[in-house]
Amino acid sequence: MLMPVDLFFRSFGGGGDGAPPLVILHGLLGSSRNWMTAGAELGRDRHVVALDLRNHGESPHTGEHTYPFMAEDVLAWMNARGIGRAHLLGHSMGGKAAMRLAADHPERVGKLVVVDIAPRNNPPYNQRAFAAMNALPVSEIRSRKDAEKFLEERIPSWAFRQFLLTSLVRDRSGGFDWQVNLPVLTESLPHLARSPLEEDEQFGGDALFVRGGRSDFVRDEDAVTIRKHFPASRIDTIEDCGHNPHMEQREAFNRRVQAFLES
């Protein structure tokens, strides 16, 4: 039995004249904080809510971390707030969770935006990041500078190190600890790399897949699989952009999402 948890959320924007709210689901090791700028801009014309998925951000930790559990968490969050139908926007892991919810409960999903991920099995990724995070001696860390120095040898990208360090927070004793549920997420990596959908599952509503032109998470050949599961979908590529178009090309990304939601 799926036991949902009560998700933390950040709210942006007004009511949008009765239009369904836009619910944003972040990627692996992220949180609603990653969407504060893009969410606020998208919230100028509608109600936008960014959630912290289970085992991330300020949401509860639990021993299960699968796409069915994440989808049921979002559905329970909607039910608790009387939201009958919402547009969904999911990035990476959050995009797969959004696909799962759309396939399970199509009547609860208006339009679907999936950011730089496809409904297929991925090769193992983020293994280096998880190895570095698990190796960090958090009980001995005295400053964020100490943590960055430790990670520098293991994570060459400065930007990616800063992203990982957003999950390093002060604990009640004044030391540091990971805000994410690192042991459970590490254990769940094989599941998270898999497609969230079975071969015959579909969502017939409008769907937009946004991919980064320099990212390999959505390949040209994925178009066939995407349209098999999402027959009313289209794929939009943002050039000169990697896996995070909402950060790397935020204005172009938001224009595409706004146009899709308003069409």
Image (cartoon, rainbow, N blue to C red):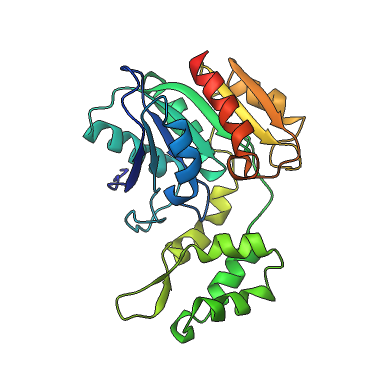
Q: Decide if residue 198 is in sight here.
A: no
Q: Decide if residue 16 is in sight here.
A: yes
Q: How many marks on residues?
A: 0
Is residue 16 toward the left or the right of residue 184 in the image?
left
Is residue 38 toward the left or the right of residue 8 in the image?
right
Q: Give coordinates of residue 92: x percent, y percent.
A: 57, 43
Q: Give coordinates of residue 162: x percent, y percent.
A: 58, 63
Q: Quadrant of the N terminus?
A: top left
Q: Is residue 152 above or below residue 198?
A: below
Residue at 35% of width from left, 18% of height from top?
Answer: 19
| Residue most extreme to the bottom | 140
Q: Give coordinates of residue 149: x percent, y percent.
A: 62, 79
Residue at 51% of width from left, 76% of height from top?
Answer: 144
Q: Is residue 242 above or below residue 133?
A: above
Is residue 118 toward the left or the right of residue 20 in the image?
right
Q: Is residue 142 above or below residue 110?
A: below
Q: Give coordinates of residue 241: x percent, y percent.
A: 71, 41
Camera-nearest residue between 172 and 217: 172
Residue at 62% of width from left, 38% of height from top?
Answer: 117
Residue at 74% of width from left, 42% of height from top?
Answer: 216
Is residue 111 toward the left or the right of residue 74 in the image?
right
